[in-house]
Amino acid sequence: MLKIIKQKRLNKNHTNDFLNLLNDVLTSDFPEYQLKTAQEYKKLYGKKWFKEEIKKKKNYFLGAFDKKTLIGVISFIGQPGGFGSVSWLFIDKKYRSQGVGISLLKKLEQWLTKNNFHGYFLYTESQKNIDFYTKRGFRHVGTMINSWFGVNEHIMEKILN
């Protein structure tokens, strides 16, 4: 398992690092998306979106760093009633399967508990990811067929103690 040198909450100063890593992941890791889809995501999740979402008190953007390089992100969008969703969990390819994603999920759940959230959900496109999340206490609650951009989205939910 990789020892993460630092995990910290992201702020507006991390905008370019966040977007660069997100764009790398969208471009290289989602063969089910066509180029047009990846370009649309880049428009939807741009500087304006990041800067607006990062300053909301109920949202939590956490980054994993190797020295000063952003290598992974988890972003949580909080909703009223103690629930919310992970909008992004992505890791640089060079750092996958080293515990970075698990570490980010654990830190998020600590923050959720401290901030009176009792659960959250996320979407994933692949069976491999369903297995990853299931091993971490999530349950598969459904599939949206031909969802955003025609891609099937699996809904994973976790209720916290």
Image (cartoon, rainbow, N blue to C red):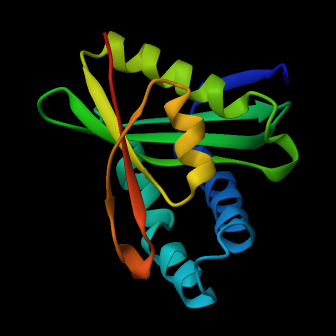
Q: In this view, does 154 lie to the left or right of 57?
A: right
Quarter location, residue 146: bottom left
| Residue at image point 41% right, 62% down | 153
Relative height, residue 15 to residue 149 (above, below): above
Is residue 82 depicted above or below 140 in this figure? above
**Is 102 drawn above or below residue 113 in the view shown?**
below
- Report the front residue among 82 and 53: 82
Using the image as rendered, state which of residue 125 and residue 34 is in the foreground. Answer: 125
**Number of numbered discs:** 0
Residue 28 x/y as whole percent: 75, 70
Q: In this view, does 118 lie to the left or right of 11?
A: left
Query: Looking at the image, is 55 positioned above or below residue 35?
Result: above
- The image quadrant that residue 23 belongs to is bottom right
Say which residue appears at 41% left-offset and 55% top-offset: 154
Residue 99 left/right relative to 152 = right
Q: Which residue lies furthest to the bottom in this view?
A: 36
Estimate the x, y position of residue 34 in percent, counting from the top left.
Answer: 60, 86
Q: Judge left or right: residue 72 versus residue 94.
A: left
Task: Give the quadrant of the C terminus.
Answer: top left
The structure residue drawn at horizontal position 22% and vertical position 32%, both measured from the top left corner, is 83
Residue 72: percent from left, percent from top: 69, 41
Answer whether residue 72 is visible to the viewer in this image: yes
**Residue at (73% x, 65% y) in the render:** 24
User: Looking at the image, which residue sits at the far left?
Assistant: 81
In the rendered image, residue 74, in percent from the top left (x then y), is placed at 54, 39
Q: Please state, as top left, top right, bottom left or bottom right, where the N terminus lies in the image.
A: top right
Instruction: Work out whether residue 77 can be spotted.
Output: no
